[in-house]
Amino acid sequence: AYLDRIAAVEPEIHAYLHVSADDALATARDVDARRAAGEELHPLAGVPIAVKDVVVTQGMPSTAGSKILEGWIPPYDATLVERIRAARMPILGKTNMDEFAMGSSTEHSAYGNTHNPWDLDRIPGGSGGGSAAAVAAFAAPLAIGTDTGGSIRQPGAVTGTVGVKPTYGSVSRYGLIALASSLDQAGPVTRTVLDSALLHELIGGHDPRDSTSIPEPLPDVVAAARQGALGDLSGVRVGIVEQLQGEGYQPGVQARFEESVELLKEAGAEVVQVSCPHFEYALAAYYLILPAEASSNLAKFDGMRFGLRVEPEEGPVTAERVMAATRGAGFGDEVKRRIILGTYALSAGYYDAYYGSAQKVRTLIQRDFEAAFEQADVLVSPTAPTTAFKLGEKLDDPLAMYLNDVATIPANLAGVPGISVPNGLSDDNLPVGFQVLAPAKADDRLYRVGAALE
Ligand code: GLN
């Protein structure tokens, strides 16, 4: 049924870069046969899933939305993909994204735009717009995203889907094509909070192949989602972050946020105001730390080891000249912009002023979170300042594009988990997201509060 749905909607949505129909059907038939034989299977066995193209999948293209990886077929699975396959979930295919997960609209994909199912002239968010659009268009019941600065939560907000960025280190990064290693985290994209919890439970947990993986077990996110669905939040302290609302937020987005805060109060939560004064500098710090790490992570795409190889049009074919020709042709403008920014921020003489200062700001943001979590069990804000904007509207203005992530980036800098849940429609009839943030390793709180809002 999902493959039929994909065939019907893909000409308009373009959520997928690759559809693995034969593979998915073979897994589904195998599950049927095992069920018929009475075999005990994982609760998600047979439930199809779409995977963001930045996650490597054995035998299936994995381009990260870039021309430089065109034609590369990974020889191994990411840990989270191994777990999906072990649960016998059919993988429907790989979803579109901004190149190397750099962007907020999926327009930086080298393979064309994805369209928001709510309005085809609008962006589906980014960088994981393909995963969010697939779920929103019923072209996948579940999907995997990655969130370095908001790429699961912001697409969730603008497509009316649920998106979770788990605690840093709680889902293995082994097999993610790295953007910024200290910020990257994979997580679920789904239609309901309980669906996200079931998927989070499956993909999360310790992995010795990721040195930053948290060794202790995850909190019980499924139980928390079930508890939240009962609608009782008595004893839960909810903090409204003063710096993540108000001015700069679309009136309809702000109004839906305030209505949901009222619903939390009605459910018994105690609501307080908290101040995180350094969040003002989060975007600036992020756009130094991320390009710095990305410039190092992307150095491996050299025209020798993976995918594309372009030889210089004239002159000698030296390693350096092949590398320059390949990177010149294979990377898009946004990727080049960030590599240049990153190498500049890391260069001798500027390192302390840029990268060093950004790291200090990161510590201040972590301390803001610590102080706020002394006053509240969870923090809340709108997920994104506006609803989905028109395709092309912000493409020529990188700073306007970066501003979409003001509310999501602080969580990545501090490593704390966050969820975006659908929060009704704004005055323009487009979906709005409500963000809940929790302390590191307390992902269960996201699910309890998120499910209470459904
Ligand atoms: N939009 C942000 C950026 O462009 C976030 C990206 C992400 O989370 N992968 O960096």
Image (cartoon, helix red, strand yellow):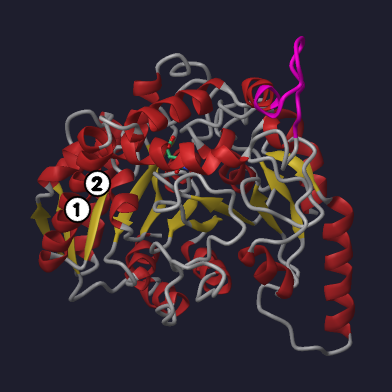
Tally the numbered discs: 2
Q: CB of mark 1 within 8 Å of CB of mark 2? A: yes
- Pinpoint residue 35: horizontal percent, then vertical percent: 83, 82
* Rendered position, 240 above or below 399: below
Residue linked to disc 1:
363
Mark 1 lies within 8 Å of ligand 1 (Cβ measured): no
Query: Looking at this view, is 311 or 280 the one in front?
Result: 311
The answer to whether residue 170 shows anywhere in this view is yes
Residue visible at 17% across and 37% down in the picture? 280
Left or right: 256 with respect to 187?
A: left
Residue at far top of view: 314
Residue 105 lies in the magenta-colored region: no
Q: Is residue 319 magenta?
A: yes
Looking at the image, residue 185 sits to the left or right of residue 369; the answer is right
| Residue 185 x %, y % | 47, 56
Q: What secondary structure is marked by label 1?
A: helix
Magenta part mainly helix, strand or loop? loop
Name the residue carrying label 2: 359
Residue at the spot 20% in from the left edge and 68% down from the top edge = 377
Q: Position of residue 57 (x, y in %)?
A: 72, 55
Question: Is 219 rendered above or below residue 2?
Answer: below
Task: State which region is magenta.
Answer: 308-322
Residue type, label 2: Gln
Q: Quadrant of ligand 1?
A: top left
